[in-house]
Image (cartoon, rainbow, N blue to C red):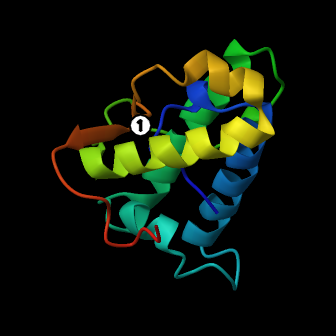
């Protein structure tokens, strides 16, 4: 499971579809609808948010917005209620940079055209995240 800090606009088609599926799984875990994945490290920052359910729904809404921009048909009814003024999830520059390198490495072999398109870009975060100075997240497994 990878719930990217990076804005979903940088993901290739395979990555965006995987993010949608994994985010829906994360939503089910946070809602208590699964037995597995309860302690998955990617969920820590959502659990630490004062409204974990709204946070994962807000994350899904951002992924859905990117799917619409690309002309895909992700099922919006799967997203739970969202808040217009949801407090951001804090993430660090180290985490964003780590994920950027991880994504570029994946794209280089999986989607060379997408890699060529974004390799010189600067990483930008999903709007749900507030990026602050700091190292890679403690829960990350580099």
Looking at the rendered structure, the secondary structure element under dot 1 is loop
Q: Position of residue 71 (x, y in %)?
A: 80, 14
User: Is residue 90 visible from the viewing direction of this image?
Assistant: no
- Residue furthest right as drawn: 73
- Residue furthest bottom as drawn: 35
Q: Position of residue 20 (x, y in %)?
A: 71, 44
Q: Residue at x 23, y 57 (%)?
A: 135
Q: Quadrant of residue 30?
A: bottom right
56 left or right of 22? left
> Mark 1 packing: few (<14 Cα in 10 Å), some, or many (20+)?
few
**Is 20 located above or below residue 116 in the figure?**
below
25 left or right of 137? right
Q: Residue at x 39, y 24 (%)?
A: 122
Q: Position of residue 129 (x, y in %)?
A: 34, 40
Q: How many marks?
A: 1
Q: Residue at x 78, y 31 (%)?
A: 13
Q: Quadrant of residue 38?
A: bottom right
The residue that label 1 is drawn on is: 83
Q: Position of residue 89 (x, y in %)?
A: 31, 48
Quadrant where the image shows the N terminus: bottom right
127 left or right of 43? left
User: Is residue 18 visible from the viewing direction of this image?
Assistant: yes
Q: Quadrant of residue 50?
A: bottom left
């Amino acid at each position: 499971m990878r719930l990217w800090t990076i804005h979903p606009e940088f993901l290739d088609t395979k990555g965006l579809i995987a993010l949608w599926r994994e985010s829906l799984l994360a939503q089910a875990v946070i809602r208590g609808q699964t037995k597995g994945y309860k302690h998955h490290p990617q969920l820590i920052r959502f659990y630490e948010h004062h409204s974990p359910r709204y946070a994962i729904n807000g994350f899904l809404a951002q992924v859905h917005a990117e799917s619409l921009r690309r002309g895909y048909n992700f099922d919006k009814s799967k997203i739970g209620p969202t808040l217009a003024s949801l407090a951001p999830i804090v993430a660090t520059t180290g985490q964003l940079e780590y994920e950027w390198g991880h994504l570029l490495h994946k794209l280089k072999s999986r989607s060379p055209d997408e890699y060529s398109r974004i390799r010189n870009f600067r990483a930008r975060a999903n709007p749900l995240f507030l990026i602050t100075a700091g190292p890679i997240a403690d829960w990350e497994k580099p």
